Structures are given as structure tokens and as C-alpha cells.
Image (cartoon, rainbow, N blue to C red):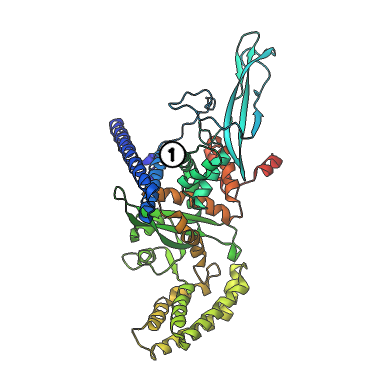
Amino acid sequence: MRTAADLPDDIDELKRRVLAAEAGLVVKTLEAEKLKLELARLKRMQFGQSSERIEREIEQLELRLEEIETSAADAAPVVTATPDEPAPDAAAVTDAKPRRQLPEYLPRVTETHEPASCTCPRCGSERMRKVGEDVTEVLEYVPGRFEVIRHVRPAYSCAKCEAMAQAPMPAMPIPRAMAGASLVAHVVVSKYVDHLPLYRQSEMYARNGLDLDRGLLADWVGKAAWLLRPLADRIGDHVMAGSVIHADDTPVPVLAPGKGKTKTGRLWVYLRDEHRHAGPAPPAVLYRYTPDRKGERCREHLAPFRGHLHADGYSGFADLYRSADGTSAGVTEVACWAHVRRGFFEFQKATGSTIAREALERIGALFDIERTIAGQSPERRREVRQALAREKLDQLAHWLDAQLTLILGKGNLAKAIRYARSRWAALTAYVDDGRLEISNNAAENAVRPITLGRKNWLFAGSDSGGERAAIMLTLLRTAKHNGVEPEAWLRDVLGRIESHPINRLDEMLPWNWLAPATQSVAA
């Protein structure tokens, strides 16, 4: 994602780019209208005939529309007040479309915001009289139900000089929107944690009598992504500053632009987690989306990193370990014994091989040692590994070499043995460094929610949708890794981030976050 530093300084060039962007937005809008027409046509066809193919086409169109609408919101900066201006008042702004009326049956909670001082801001007189009030209704989500917060702001006039005084409207995550922070947080978590597309959420809300169409939800999600991107970037900086990272990736189906078909993108995960060796740094997980699996993608992601990298045997990582002249490039490979074990397990399950079974027992003994030292200091872990695991690894190496002379050279069992022996230095690196792990299971666990939810998540509607998913997953999964409830954290952050000083952004990171009740006590 480009930043302001990437833009040219030339005014004419900037104007040209703005015009091009506006033209692109028009094209996107036209494309959206065409898709809406096609969607209506397919729904009419479905009315008289049930067809899995038609249902699938409708689902793809729904997601494509969702991504067009969300991307438009993500691309447009959120309009906020300057430090010298009052916060925008949703009730005082005349929008192109009339503000949606919230259902009368929803419970109302009134919050009154009085001016900070009872004296006239101009002349200092205490003769202030109430001349009216502004009321702004904001829809919020309380677990299990909706409610409306009535923000009442009395307006006062000075009897002496007629100057006006009124409290500003509390900061909203999306100025002039009807949604409060708790509702936006719920929509985001439902989409990226519970894998509920926006059109399905819209249908669910409609059953409760709420007219929250997909376009409206998409606008909230896009603007939330724009607001939260700096926090995701800070998490990424924290991950790359670690000395040990776990890396993995998984395919994600993505709609190909204009074709109605899917292509395969990738979601990469980079995890920093020191708790297994009693390290002081908080855990964090960074997700990155790319439209393909070219080796340059992971090398670009890991360009700032120097240290030990837990990863599989993907060739794209190779240039990270060695530079063009064969010298170290600053990243040390750490291979995964779980990958090695998997090859023997699959062969033993298929054939009942006694050699594969013994390999599994020998590898299992190495994992047994690790269970006894989980959470202990790096020094203690290294000491135990040197005493107990080093000899077992030496014996395993000799045994594998001997078995290779007794079996077919081109079979799957031989392949599993060669995989282990060809990566032996990377597989045994953990014995000499107590910060390292025997496996890359930590990264695989970070990928698993995506894999498990893929049937419901289906696919991203575009490459920009994949990038947006990576931002949200970075935030929400990092919260979970730190024992923080994602929706509670996101609700509080969205309610404060607009007015929070940029130089104190780290206060909002999940590992620094204080729940609202704790904040009030600390204050």
C-alpha cells in the first residue's frame, strides 16, 4: 500500500492522478451497476428454478459488489476535524441522501453532553440560558441486541453578549455515519473472524427489522480499514524487529476482475512469539496478501528482518539464507520436524511400514523432550537439548542413512528420508539455540483459522479485498494472541482512534491496551 511519501511533488502530476482516480471510480460505479442488474436477473431466474450454479453465480456477484463498495470506502480518507475545529456534527450536516431513521422500537439510551464551562466563552458572564439542543442518534450493538444512543447536546446563549456555547459531538469512528464503534466492530469481527460476508450480515439484520444494506456495511468496513491500517503497520514493525519469526502461507481463492472466475492468491503469515522460551516481547502475528506465490513476495515482506526464520522448504525463501556470492544474507533457516514427521506418517498409514513406524517413534522422542522444557529460559532449553536430544539426533541420522540403502530409491519412503537428510543442518539448529522451536506449528496454527473458515469465507472479492483481510486479521489475531477479546478491543479502539495522538499510537496496540474500566481506574 503506497504512502504519501510515494506521491510526486509536482502539482500538475498530482492533479492528473486525481482525475485518473475519479475516472476509475466512475468505471467501478458503472461496473457495480452492471453487476446489480445481472444479480437481479439471476435472482429472477432462481425464483422459478433452484440451481446450484445460479446460487453460486449470485454469491460471486454479491461478493464482487461487496468488494467494489468496500474498496471505494477504503480508498477515500475519513474526513475528520482539524485540531482547531469542532468535531463534525452528524445532525448538522446535510448529506446527499437523507439520514436513515432508526426504528422506534429499539431501546434508547440518552447521553447528555454539557459544555465544559458554565461561563460565557466570550465575555465570561455566568448568565447562560438554554436556547435549544441538538440530538444525534447512533446505532450501537450490545452483545445479543441493538440499542440507540441519543447524544443530546444542549445549546446555551449568553444573556449579556449572546455568544453561543455547546459541547462538541463525541468522536465517532466514521463521522456522519449512523453506526457507533460497537456496531462497526461487530460487523468487522463477524466478517473476518466469523467468516460472514456482508450480504449475509445484511440479511440477518433485516430479520431484526434493521435496514442495513450491504453497501452501507461495506462503507463502514472500508473506512475502518483506512483508520486501522497504521496500527497494523506498527504490529508489522514489531514482528520484523524480532530475532525469531515463524512463517507460512495458504492459498485463498480470489475473484478475477471482470471475468466472474476465481484465481489463487496467497495469505502469508509471520509470527513472533517468545512465550515458549520465556521471552519478554509480546506475541504478534502479521498477515500479508499477494496475488501469487512468487518468491519475491516473501523476500519483500522479510526485507527488514535479520534472525532465525522457521519455515517450510519453499524455494522462495532460499535467497533469504544466502546472497548471490554464497555468503550469509542475515537470515538463518530453521526447518520443521513436524513436516518431516508428516511424510513418514502418511507412508506408514498407507502401507503399515515398520521402518516408517520406527522413524515416527524416534521423532516422537524428540518432541517428548520439548514438552518438558516448554516455557523455560533459552539457557535451560539449550542445556536439556544438548544433554538429551543431541545424541538421539546423531543416532537418527545414522539410522536414516542405513535405511536408505535397504529400500527402493524412488519410493515415497525414500523421499521422506532424503527430505530429512537434505535439510539436516536446518532441522538440528534448534538444539544449539534455546530460542528456537522443534517445529513450525506456531505458524501453521496461525494459518488454520483461514483454512477452517474457507468454506464459509469462500474467497476475497478482489486483490484489494485480500489486502484488507490481511490488515484485519493482523489486528484481530494479534489481539487473541495477547489474551485480549478482539471485539472488545476493536470497539474501544474505533471509538478513540480518530482523536488519539498519532505519536501515542502504540498505546492502542493489543499488548498495551487497557480495557475501558481499567482506564478509568488508572486515570
| Residue 338 vertical placement versus 486 (above, below) | below
| Residue 281 vertical placement versus 312 (above, below) | above
- Note whether residue 344 is visible: yes
> For the residue marked with disc 1, what is the amino acid?
Gly
Closer-to-camera residue (436/290): 290
- Rendered location of residue 399, percent (x, y): 46, 88
Which residue shows up at 50% across the image and 70% down it?
A: 439
Q: Residues within 10 Å of mark 1 (few under 14, many from 20)?
A: some
Residue of label 1: 215
- Note whether residue 237 is visible: no
Closer-to-camera residue (302/63): 63
275 lies left or right of 408 = right
- Rendered location of residue 180, percent (x, y): 56, 36
Quarter residue 24 falls in = top left
Q: Residue furthest top?
A: 160
Q: Residue furthest bottom?
A: 406
- Rendered location of residue 101, percent (x, y): 53, 29
Which residue shows up at 42% across the image and 89% down it?
A: 403
370 lies left or right of 251 = right
Which residue shows up at 43% across the image and 26% down it?
A: 96
In which quadrant of the rendered image does the C terminus lie? top right
